[in-house]
Image (cartoon, coloured by chain):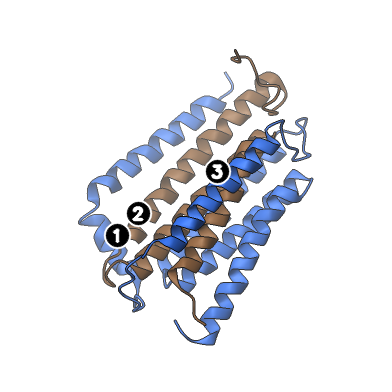
Chain colours: A blue, B brown
Amino acid sequence: MEDVGSVVAFWTLSVVTVGAALMVVAVRNLIHAVLFLILSFIGVAGLYITLSADFVAITQILIYVGAISVLILFAVLLTPRAARDNAETFLQVPGLVLAALVGVTIGAVVLVTDWNEATRGPFSETAEAIGEALLDKYVLPFEIASVLLLAAMVGAIVLVRED
Amino acid sequence: MSVELSHYLMVGAILFSIGLYVALAKRNAIGILMGIELMFNAVNLTLIAFSRFVSPPTDVSGHVFVVFVITVAAAEAALALALAMVVYRNRETIDIDKINLMRW
């Protein structure tokens, strides 16, 4: 990953991702915050591509940008009389302190630790390997995930049902 | 000048901090959910970065883990938004300062 293109791509996508996440905090309209959240998701998908994780990038676009963002937008639009000002609670200062503390701690750990980086070769194509792993080594978590999705779907329907 | 593992980890750390702040400090319940989704994304980015730089090149365990995390995040988002809808139907608000029925 020494070529110029991937370096430029990494920095551009990082700035887009982090900047959009900061705008989620800063903007005063909840709808705009959701739109910046979508931009941040797209930036993360681009970062996956720079990490040669094509299948996960497509999954990110489909699930996060396609499904979860639309779900959040629907939830905002279905609560019309709730406040849309994206304001903070009284926990603003403690939250800021705690978030900064966590960020600085993780950053320090990242910089101090020797990560023993081994391999740099790109994956040729991950979809096939992931599919084989899901149905071979990780078949039990795969089945449990399907049960979890079914339970979540039934639970969501039962919760919002009018009766 | 090249992109190393620590660059990705720093982006993940910053994204996680922002998500943590949003989840802790926002007043709207949907805003809190957005913060949680940001934290999920930061963790997934970290997992993919480790899978790329540390694990052997043919091992896709990190990718599979991220797929499972995305699955659980989708289920969690659906349930959390359903809860927000129920609260809104009963209380006409999703402001967590006003949802204090069980506060001591």
Camera-side residue of A145 and B64: B64
Residue located farthest toward the left when viewing the structure as drawn: A136
Amino acid beneath label 1: Ser
Locate residue A146: give its quadrant: top left
Locate residue A122: give its quadrant: bottom left
Amino acid beneath label 2: Phe
Q: CA distance from mark 1 to mark 3?
A: 24 Å
Q: Is residue A108 visible?
A: yes
Label 1 in the same subunit as label 3 = yes
1 and 3 marks in contact (CB < 8 Å)? no
Residue located farthest toward the front when viewing the structure as drawn: A112
Residue located at (52% from left, 38% from top): B78
Secondary element under disc 2, as helix, strand or loop, is helix
- Vertical relation: B26 (above or below) A24: above
- Vertical relation: A98 (above or below) A110: above
Label 1 in the same subunit as label 2 = yes
Residue located at (49% from left, 76% from top): B3
Amino acid beneath label 3: Ile
1 and 2 marks in contact (CB < 8 Å)? yes
- Mark found first going from the N terminus, 1 or 3: 3
Task: Tell me which chain the residue with mark 3 is part of.
Answer: B
Residue located at (39% from left, 33% from top): A151
Camera-side residue of A61 and B61: B61
Residue at label 1? B61
Q: Is residue A61 visible?
A: no
Residue at label 3? B36
Residue at label 2? B65
Image location of residue A105, percent across then percent down? 50, 51
Secondary element under disc 1, as helix, strand or loop, is helix
Neighbours of disc 2 within 10 Å: few (<14), some (14-19), many (20+): some
